[in-house]
Amino acid sequence: KKSALCEVKVAVIGGPGVGKSALSVRFLTRRYIGEYDHQSETRYKHEVLVDNEPVLYEILDTCPKNEEDLPSTETINWADGLLLVYSIIDRRSMSYLKRVGSLIANSDIPVYIVANKNDMVHLREVSAEEGAILARHFECGFSEVAAAEMVAPVAVVFQELCRAVLAARRK
Ligand code: GDP
Ligand code: MG
């Protein structure tokens, strides 16, 4: 008998402080708390409907110790899809994702790029165009959001990644 519930494992990847925990918690609870005392990797399970089908997300909110601390092979192999997060007010966080890109260059794992902190445009260091260029390079979806501001665009990002994972499975 086919299992009714499809499972999608997502690793949330990005440099320190870009808002990985804020985005994960926003998606899970619809709330924005502001400070996230996550000193280590945190795992969550969350069931939602995607295109009217129940999907069980397993979310791994990764926790790099510094800019040099890239995700492990174990994490990448575990995941069905990667949510790659940078902050529009932190140029280093864009470089971090480019280095993650080299790590996964030979894999065909579905990814989605999120530019977070879109509420802070007055401090912008990375243009939307740069994000779009990176997304073309990865052949993946891209959007700018603010975990601090709204829940709907954050949920869309997780949905889009889920769709990419399910499409890859059907191949
Ligand atoms: P992580 O290290 O990637 O998990 O980042 P956190 O989720 O802990 O967020 C780091 C800091 O950025 C915290 O102070 C958050 O409150 C803040 N932050 C997260 N998302 C946003 C956002 O969309 N806008 C603004 N202005 N701050 C944010
Ligand atoms: Mg965190």
Image (tube, grey):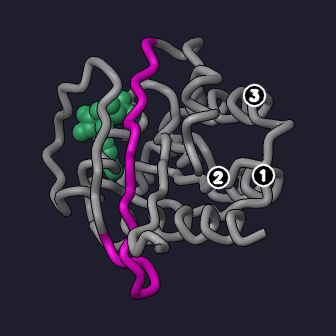
Indicate which disc, 2 or 1, sits on the residue closer to the N terminus: 2
Q: Is residue 76 left or right of residue 139?
A: left
Q: Quadrant of ligand 1?
A: top left
Q: Amino acid at mark 2?
A: Val
Please provide the residue range marked out in magenta.
48-65
Do the residues under discs 2 and 1 have CB atoms within 8 angstroms? yes
Report helix, strand or loop for mark 1: helix
Q: Image height check: is 133 above or below 123?
A: below
Count the labels in the image: 3
Cα distance in 3D space between marks 1 and 3:
12 Å
| Few, some or many residues within 10 Å of mark 2 (<14, 14–19, 20+) | many
Residue 131, horizontal then vertical, whole percent: 67, 52
Q: Main secondary structure of the magenta part?
A: strand
Q: Is residue 94 left or right of residue 66?
A: right
| Residue tagged 1 | 138
Q: Image height check: is 25 above or below 98?
A: below
| Residue tagged 3 | 103
* Residue pictured at 34% horizontal, 50% vertical: 23
Residue 17, image quadrant: top left
Between 144 and 124, the residue placed more toward the observer is 144
Q: Amino acid at mark 3?
A: Leu
Report helix, strand or loop for mark 3: helix
| Few, some or many residues within 10 Å of mark 1 (<14, 14–19, 20+) | some
Indicate the quadrant containing the C terminus: top left, top right, bottom left or bottom right.
Answer: bottom right
| Residue tagged 2 | 111
Indicate which disc, 1 or 3, sits on the residue closer to the N terminus: 3
80 inside magenta stretch: no
Q: Amino acid at mark 1?
A: Phe
Between 56 and 152, the residue placed more toward the observer is 56
